[in-house]
Image (tube, rainbow, N blue to C red):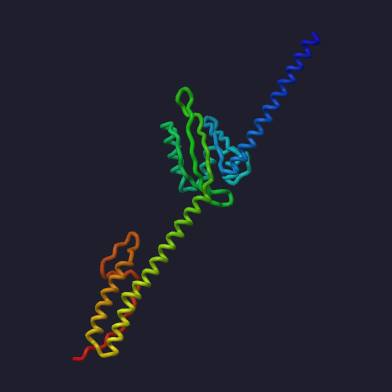
Amino acid sequence: MGDTSEQVLGTAEQEVQRRLEAEAQLNDLRLRVDNAQQLANMGDYDWHMPTDTNRWSDQLYRIYGYEPQSFNPSYERFLSFLHPDDREHVQAVHQQALATGEPYEMTERIVRPDGELRYLSTNGQVLFDEDGSPVRMRGTCIDITERVLAEREREEHAARAQAERMRRRAALEINDNVVQGLTAALYALEVDDDNSARGYVLRTLDAARQVITDLSTPLEGDEFQPGDLVRENAAELPEQPEQPA
C-alpha cells in the first residue's frame, strides 16, 4: 500500500514537473516571438467574431501606440484607430474576405494617440466553422512607415533634381538662343547695320518662342491656347514711340 502511494505521489510530482517545464518553454517561446516581432516591427492579431474579442500580440499594441494588453481591441475600436480616409477601404477588404474566404493584403494608415501617422502592411485570412460561418479573422501587420517615408523622400529628391535640370536647361537655352542673338543685334546696330540687326532680332524672336514652347508645361487640368495669359496680371509694356508721318 505504501509503495502504491509513493508511486502515485511520484507520478503526480512528475506531472507537475512536466507541466512547469512546459509552461517555462511556452513562456520562453512567447518571449522569443515578442523579441522577433519587435525587431521586425511586426505584430499579429486574432479576432474571434462571435465574441468580438481580438487578441493582439504585444508588439501590435506598441505599433498602435499603446501598452501591451491594455484593452480589448474590438472591431469598432480597431476601426477608430484607422485614418478616416482609409476606414471604408479596410471594411471593404474585410467584407470581400468574409464573402469569398480568400486571403487579403492591404496597406492602411493608423493614427496613434499622440496624432502620429503610421503606415501598416496587413495580411490576413478568415476561418470558418463546419457550417461555413466565419468565426475568426487573423493575420499580421508590419509597420512600414520608415520605408514609405524613405520612398517618398526619394521621389521628392528625384523631382527636385529634375526641376534643377530643367532650370539649367532653360538657362542654357535662353543664353544660347536669346541672349546671344540680342547681343549680335545690338552690335549690328552699333555699326549701323540695320538689316543685319533686323535679321538677328527676328531670328531671336523665333528662337525665344521655341524655347518657351519647349520649356513650358501647362498646369494640370488647364488647357491654354496660343495668346492666353498664364499670369494674373500681364507685365506692362512700354509705350511705343509715335511713327513719323
The one of 133 and 6 positioned closer to us in this rendering: 6
- Left or right? Give the position of 182 relative to 128: left
Hey, which quadrant is residue 17 in on the image? top right
* Rendering quarter of residue 234: bottom left
Seen at 57% across and 45% down, the residue is 64
State the image coordinates of residue 193 (x, y, percent, origin top left). 24, 88
How far from the left and from the top, in percent, is residue 132? 45, 25
Horizontal side of 25 relative to 170 (left or right) equals right
User: Which residue is outermost to the top?
Assistant: 1
Image quarter in which the N terminus is found = top right
Which is more toward the observer, 99 or 160? Answer: 160
* As drawn, 31 above or below 7: below
Above or below, comparing residue 15 to residue 74 in the picture: above
Q: Residue at x 27, y 76 (%)?
A: 205
Quadrant in the picture for the C terminus: bottom left
Question: Relative to residue 68, is residue 162 depicted above or below?
Answer: below
| Residue plotted at (49% across, 29% down) | 127
Give residue 18's position: percent from left, percent from top. Answer: 70, 23
Vertical side of 25 occupied by 154: above or below: below
| Frontmost residue, 183 versus 125 | 183
Q: Residue furthest left?
A: 245
Q: Please give left or right for residue 71 compared with residue 96 in the image.
A: right
* Residue 28 location (% of width, % of height): 66, 34
Q: How many marks?
A: 0
* Extreme-right residue of the structure: 2
